[in-house]
């Protein structure tokens, strides 16, 4: 848990600056998008000038959270252009749902160039995050790895500061918490989650409408991509470990993008024997993105960390060298050790 002193430091930091650059990790998920959207509302209500920056495209099903489209780093603006003032003068940098450089893509360049020759940042950085993997990116850190979602920490900050929760904030934070708990199915769903979501529902979030926007809103292409993925399913170690993959040609054939893979890995956990799973996605640069999930018996964050990635005990990821079969073998060997079996089984 985060103590009151750290919350006070964060409130004082926000109060001391007028222009805020707000961002999150690459491939933003519901927790990331919900926190960015909610904090945009909070900071604007406080009279701050807020500029949201996304490090990769926002998935279509989260666009409803935002009143306007944020620029995307590498597409609409470059890191050096931010340093040159392209987004205007920035007093404070706020990063949510990430505290490691591996999660920040090209924004790492901006952060490191934001240092003085004495190793101290020109602009202060506030981090709000719940991941175990941490590089201590912030000058002030609100990090609680016991929180099921960063949205819970953002809500605690708002309550600690005494700021009002509007209907839009409530919806955004409900999305953050509900998606990072798999709509309350994951083992990280605890009483804190339910209590927070009850508060947010009372503040105006409408769970049924949110669910429809998130999960009953597939494009035809995304549904076809899921079918292509399911056709690759392999079960290992007596059905306890599921492996699936998506190739570049699957995106081309279905007219989809990498963002359309979000949450597809969870489909194989409907199989009763499956305790952990991996989804391997072929990238244009030849690397393989590996997403890992666990029902709790396997700590996939430790496996991801061995390859420079990170995440949580039940959900993590890393980039692996190709080709696909090489990436699969690397993960199978690690999973075999966790399950006490040999990778040939």
Image (spheres, rainbow, N blue to C red):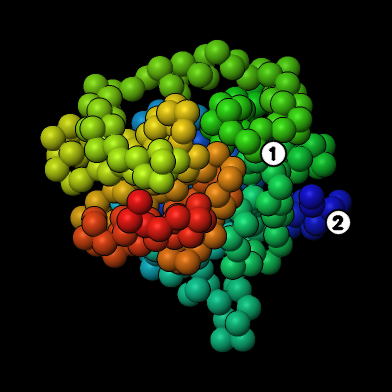
Q: Position of residue 318 (x, y in %)?
A: 41, 58
Numbered label attached to residue 327:
none
- Whether residue 9 is visible: yes
Circle 1 residues within 10 Å: few <14, some 14–19, many ≥20 = many
As drawn, 114 above or below 144 = below
Q: Where, by quadrant of the figure, is residue 240 drawn?
A: top left
Q: Is residue 102 left or right of residue 146?
A: left
Q: Is residue 110 left or right of residue 93?
A: left
> Residue farthest to the right?
4
Q: Nearer the viewer, residue 130 or 273?
A: 273
State which mark lies toward you, 2 or 1: 1
Q: Secondary structure at mark 1?
A: helix
Please report contact status of discs 2 and 1: CB closer than 8 Å, yes or no. no
Q: Nearer the viewer, residue 254 or 301?
A: 301
As drawn, 107 above or below 239 = below
Q: Position of residue 36 (x, y in %)?
A: 55, 42
Query: At 59% across and 17% down in the image, what residue appears?
Result: 207
Circle 2 residues within 10 Å: few <14, some 14–19, many ≥20 = few
As drawn, 81 above or below 120 = above
Q: Which residue is mark 1?
A: 152
Query: At 18% across and 46% down in the image, what residue appears?
Result: 248
Q: Position of residue 148 (x, y in %)?
A: 65, 40
Q: Secondary structure at mark 2?
A: helix
Whichever of callouts 2 and 1 sits on the residue coming sooner in the sequence is 2
Q: Where, by quadrant of the figure, is residue 92 drawn?
A: bottom right
Numbered label attached to residue 5:
2
Query: At 51% across and 19% down in the image, what residue appears?
Result: 211
- Whether residue 263 is visible: no
Q: Position of residue 2 (x, y in %)?
A: 79, 52
Query: At 70% across and 59% down in the image, what residue appears?
Result: 141
Whole-Å distance between the Cαs marked 2 and 1?
18 Å
């Amino acid at each position: 848990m985060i103590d009151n002193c750290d919350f006070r430091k964060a409130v004082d930091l926000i109060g001391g600056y007028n222009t805020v650059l707000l961002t999150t990790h690459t491939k933003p998920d519901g927790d990331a998008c919900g926190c960015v959207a909610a904090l945009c509302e909070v900071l604007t209500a406080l009279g701050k000038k807020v500029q949201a920056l996304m490090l990769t495209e926002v998935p279509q099903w989260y666009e409803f959270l935002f009143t306007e489209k944020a620029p995307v780093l590498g597409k609409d603006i470059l890191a050096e252009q931010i340093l040159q003032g392209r987004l205007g003068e920035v007093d404070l940098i706020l990063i949510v749902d990430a505290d490691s450089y591996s999660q920040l893509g090209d924004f790492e360049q901006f952060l490191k160039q934001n240092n003085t020759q004495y190793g101290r940042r020109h602009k202060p950085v506030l981090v709000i995050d719940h991941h175990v993997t941490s590089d201590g990116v912030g000058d002030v850190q609100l990090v609680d790895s016991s929180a099921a979602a960063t949205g819970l920490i953002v809500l605690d900050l708002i309550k600690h500061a005494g700021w009002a929760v509007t209907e839009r904030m409530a919806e955004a934070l409900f999305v953050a918490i509900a998606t990072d708990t798999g709509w309350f199915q994951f083992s990280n769903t605890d009483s804190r989650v339910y209590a927070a979501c009850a508060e947010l529902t009372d503040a105006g979030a409408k769970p049924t409408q949110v669910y429809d926007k998130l999960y009953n809103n597939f494009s035809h292409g995304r549904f076809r991509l899921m079918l292509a993925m399911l056709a690759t399913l392999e079960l290992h170690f007596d059905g306890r470990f599921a492996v699936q993959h998506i190739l570049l040609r699957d995106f081309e054939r279905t007219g989809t993008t990498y963002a359309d893979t979000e949450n597809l890995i969870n489909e194989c956990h409907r199989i009763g024997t499956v305790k952990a799973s991996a989804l391997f996605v072929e990238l244009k640069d030849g690397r393989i993105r590996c997403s890992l999930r666990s029902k709790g018996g396997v700590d996939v964050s430790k496996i991801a960390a061995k390859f420079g990635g990170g995440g949580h005990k039940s959900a993590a990821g890393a980039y692996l060298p190709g080709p696909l079969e090489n990436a699969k073998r690397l993960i199978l060997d690690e999973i075999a050790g966790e399950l006490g079996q040999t990778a040939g089984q």
